[in-house]
Image: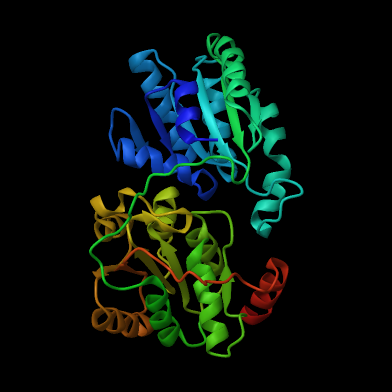
Amino acid sequence: MRVTSLIEIIGSDFYTGVPDSQLKALCNYLMSQYGIDPKHHIIAANEGNCTALAAGYHLATGKIPVVYMQNSGEGNIINPVASLMNDKVYAIPCVFIIGWRGEPGVHDEPQHIYQGEVTLKLLEDMDIAYFVISKETTEDELAAKMEEFKQILAIGKQVAFVVRKGTLEFDGKVKYENDNSMTREEIIKHIVEHTGNDPIVSTTGKASRELFEIREARSEGHERDFLTVGSMGHASSIALGIALQKQDKKIWIIDGDGAALMHMGAMAVIGANAPNNIVHIVINNSAHETVGGMPTVAGKIDIVAIAKGCGYTYAVSVDNFESLDMELETAKIRNELSLIEVKCSIGARENLGRPTTTAIENKLNFINFIK
């Protein structure tokens, strides 16, 4: 189905969301049509943030907003949907567009399997009427369902279109790039060179995939690395939980800007606890690059100042390998909570693979390693 048909049938002029590879056609259309425009399109930090933005839009205009997201974000919307938007509270209507990762019967990565199984049930539990869109769905069927949905929206409830893999199409081209020169994979190679035998907790997405392949290329095992394959935004909190219990070990975090933004409150908790054995590396390409390259707001904020404000003893930003190597070398021996922001380009190898070990194997090997 052409994404423009979906847009026309829904009939909203305000979209906010967190990008998803399954909704890449929608994301690219919105970026080509609006870019980032406070009147029409906002990419938010997390899905709860989107939902609250949508509520504000409705309060200001009386019109129906649209929130787009991957189904992994359903957990983030439960609170604002149940305690703010619900018709027993403020009765705020909203249309959700949800990419269905891990759909039963469709091969996907392990972090999506259970989420895919409960996607529709969670919508039912939140009293959100839904309609599943597939390649076979016609525009007439979609339009008829939207007419039904309008009656539901009119009484202050929410509805959802759940989008199956490969459903939406957009012929336009959108190029995502920045002025940074260092690639993420090369940055991670430099990190591995300096961390030695220290444990690493890496964020979800391509960063963990690249870390896995770097270990393979070096003929090293994977027991040092905890790959946060799902749970976007929580790698730093996982690392904090480890660091507080293993104070004799230096714990390194490989984070991304989108992940750091998604649950930025974690930095405040890390700073307040001030573990002197954490090095928090935020690889910042100002993009949701793993799911297509759509922008984050990380290019417009000062991550170093935020870290210092949260209580990190040392924080610095680098944009070249010479400075990166120097900071990694000194972080290795520094006995203070540290953050290194690394400015990064957008892009990855076309042939980038995925971990060949299971999540359970990763967990058990990591537990045995840090004993």
Percent position (x, y) of residue 157?
A: 57, 16
Q: Would residue 88 be seen by someone viewing this image from the given angle?
A: no
Q: Position of residue 17 (x, y in %)?
A: 44, 38
Image spot of residue 289 (x, y percent) = 42, 58
Side of 136 where 251 appears, left or right: left
For the residue pair 29 and 92, the one nearer the viewer reads as 29
> Is 124 on the left-hand or right-hand side of 41?
right
Which of these two is toward me, 21 or 186? 21
The quadrant of the rendering that contains the N terminus is top right
For the residue pair 312 and 26, the one nearer the viewer reads as 26
Residue at 66%, 22% in the rendered image: 127
Q: Quadrant of the C terminus?
A: bottom right
**Res 164 visible:** yes
Query: Which quadrant holds residue 256?
Result: bottom left
Horizontal side, residue 193 vs residue 145: left or right: left
Residue 18 % position (x, y): 45, 43
Query: Measuring 34% from the left and 41% from the top, which residue is drawn there?
Result: 31
The residue under the point 37% across, 70% down is: 337
- Among all residues in the image, which is located at the extreme bottom? 219
Q: Height in image: 149 above or below 369?
A: above
Above or below, 18 against 38 in this view is: below
